[in-house]
Image (tube, rainbow, N blue to C red):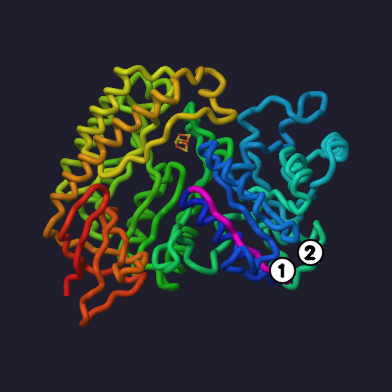
Amino acid sequence: MPTFHIITLGCQMNYSDSARIKAVLTNCGFSYSETEENADIIIFDTCSVRQKAEDKITWKLKDIPPEKKIWITGCMIQHNFRSPLMQSPQGSMGGTLKKWNFLWTITTPNPTIIWITNEQIKIFLWTSQNSSEILFVNHAFNPQFFNLHQTYPNLELFFRIDDTGYLPLILQKIGYELSNFDTEMVNEYEKIIPNENPSMNAHHRSAYLPISTGCNQFCAYCIVPFARGLERHFPAEQIIHEAKLHLQKGAKELTLLGQIVNKHPDFVHILREILKLDGLERLRYTSPYPTYYTSELLSLHENEPKLCPHIHIPFQSGSSAVLKKMFRGYSAAECYDFIDQIRKLNRDISITTDMIIGFPGETEEDFAESLQLVEYGKFDMIFMGIYSPRPWTFAAKQYPDDLPYAVKHSRREQMNTLLKQLSQANNQKEIWTIRTMLINEKGEDGSFSGYTDNMKQIIISGNADSFRPTVGEMLPVRITGAGEFKLRGEMVI
Ligand code: SF4
């Protein structure tokens, strides 16, 4: 049976998706190769949040030798989809994009799989009554397949992440003889349990656990709803069951994932139940949305030591005018209020945020308001993105991208300079405190790096003769030094 290797780009959700792809393929008899060189099939699990992420894939395709097959999945191809619901009244492809285009979930055990030419697709669609039973792959799913296939004839498969459970059926359709797979499988993404704890780290002591997918918010700049579809919240029992499995396999830290993770209707219940599980040492979640924080959730942060003292709260801007244009649904005044609520808790919580720099029409005053918010929030980290228009989005269609790159770049530099000062000052306050550290890597110089419970990067030296830590270990450390974005520490023996 073929061997495969997965190249994952983007966020934690993609790492979790890749672990599911791996589980389905190994269940079919394929084997995973840790290296590209030894794999017959290279799978790209892609990101599309910024154009840069998509460009990376197109560059990387050039490096794949022609004898290896290429499969592509993930956000980059999903926002270029064409669904059966995108027909014009005449039945031709490429009709108007409607809300219903995002509700494309197939759950029949026996879908019709089509991947063929334009003409055949049209005929198929004209005669087909029930689009919820048609599984579109390759060119039928995305015209981009045809173009890339001209350059890379070894490109074999485009499939949606939501269709991962159907991979066995798809592979049989395109000619693979499978040794073994679950014939009862229908496409319930959340029921695919990864073989190993999904993580960006090699040690698998921390695991990502998706609790929802998709987004209904449609922020003006964001491609995610187009790439991942509308929100689906997974059942609480299924999530808690998966959490137990990860802990039984040795995970110590769990991170719950969702595009708006705290919008899950049972979010606090799920946190409470997972916090009771044996073996759990740390619980995190990402990415939350400011307006879905409740006093109950904040109180959990205050009172549950295993719920990490870190809140990532993506504000995106400190200007009410810009936030309104972004359709974020909150004002700058509310951002200050969120920060105050966190600071009032009887526990020291590290706050990080996301900021978009140079959104269309962002004036010097708007940007100054963002800097004011950063200063007030004393954020430990800001994930800054220079604005670039993304296809399908309201901003790309309605707001001219009017700020020169030099202006955006200079604003980013200003925010970065402020962030460095804040980080240095915040980290100084950590000196001589004791924190827990999860060791992610061992350096060539014998040092160890990882993250503290409050999500700060830390390096410790491994020179204590009596006790040598190992990668994947969670241990108490004393902070002995502080710099921008980094702490230094020593093991507490
Ligand atoms: S909340 Fe807004 S920024 Fe976040 S994924 Fe949804 S649309 Fe994108």
User: Residue 392 versus residue 284: which sits nearer the camera?
Assistant: 392
User: Residue 285 versus residue 411: which sits nearer the camera?
Assistant: 411
Instruction: Give the structural element (helix, strand or loop) at label 2.
Output: loop
Q: Is residue 146 above or below residue 471?
A: above
Q: Which amino acid does label 1 sit on?
A: Pro
Counting other residues with Cα less than 10 Å from the Cα at mark 2, is it few (<14), some (14-19), or many (20 or more)? few
Dot 1 corresponds to which residue? 2
Could you tell me if residue 278 is visible in this image? no
Q: Which segment did they paint magenta?
A: 1-10
Q: Mark 2 and ligand 1: say if the CB distance to the nearest ligand atom is below 8 Å.
A: no
Q: What residue type is labelled 2?
A: Tyr
Dot 2 corresponds to which residue? 176
Could you tell me if residue 202 is visible in this image? yes
Residue at left offset 27%, top offset 23%: 369
Name the image quarter holding residue 451.
bottom left
Magenta stretch prevailing secondary structure: strand
Q: Quadrant of the C terminus?
A: bottom left
Q: Residue 220: image x %, image y %?
A: 48, 26
Query: Reading the chain from its start, which is encountered first: label 1 or label 2?
Result: 1
Residue at left offset 29%, top offset 53%: 455
Q: In which quarter of the image is the N terminus?
A: bottom right
